[in-house]
Amino acid sequence: MDSGALRGAYAEVLAEVDAGGFAAPPTGQWSAEQIVAHLAANDELMTEATEAVLAGSPFAYYDLETIHRPQVDALVAECGGLDGLATLLRATSQKLCALTDRLGPAAAQTPVETHLREGFDLVVDEPLPWARTLDLHTRVHLPKHLAQLRMLRAG
């Protein structure tokens, strides 16, 4: 599995984070800090799933924002702001990309019980080849949060 597109998607998100200047979010939406913490927490979940795939172990991947909202808020407090969160996201994304580089064709097709929800646009609640889940992360999940960050700056 080629992680070039994944690395590129992270580079875009991290460039946006580094640009800074984010406004407070509209009521009920996430701050820039919460978005970055969410991505780092999600990277940890995806890393666990990728490690399980590489080890040949069964695994279920859940990216339900409500499940790890307390973890997101704890990470925001623990990292002490956007700079600390950006450092964390750099580390978690690099680890995920490095593991993704190790996925061969057979491992990439390993079915993983996947549960994710991107608003009303994408709902997955079934086994998917792990490469497909990584592709959705690259093409849907990261761009969604990049757009949120850009709206917080424009706001």
Image (tube, rainbow, N blue to C red):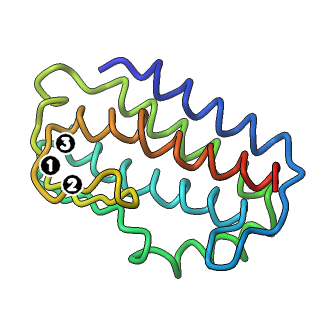
Q: Tell me the crowding category of disc 3: few under 14, some 14 to 19, or many 20 or more residues within 10 angstroms, Cα based.
A: many
Closer to the N terminus: mark 2 or mark 3?
Answer: 3
Figure check: 102 above or below 80: above
- Residue at far bottom of view: 70
Q: Amino acid at mark 3?
A: Val
Q: Quadrant of the N terminus?
A: top left
* Marks 3/1: CA–CA distance: 8 Å
Q: Amino acid at mark 2?
A: Val
Q: Kindly indicate the quadrant of the structure image that contains residue 55.
A: top left
Closer to the N terminus: mark 1 or mark 2?
Answer: 1
Q: Quadrant of the C terminus?
A: bottom right
* Marks 2/3: CA–CA distance: 19 Å
Residue designated by label 2: 124
Closer to the N terminus: mark 3 or mark 1?
Answer: 3
How far from the left and from the top, in percent, is residue 119? 40, 61
Q: Tell me the crowding category of disc 1: few under 14, some 14 to 19, or many 20 or more residues within 10 angstroms, Cα based.
A: many
Tag nearer the camera, 3 or 1:
1
Number of numbered discs on residues: 3
Tag nearer the camera, 2 or 3:
2
33 horizontally vs 40: left or right: right
Figure check: 8 above or below 19: above
Dot 2: element: strand
* Marks 1/2: CA–CA distance: 12 Å
- Residue at far right of view: 21
Pick the front one: 43 or 139: 139
66 horizontally vs 107: left or right: right
Q: Amino acid at mark 1?
A: Val
Pick the front one: 110 or 142: 142
Figure check: 39 above or below 14: below
What number is the disc on residue 112? 1
For the point 43% across and 34% down, the residue is 138
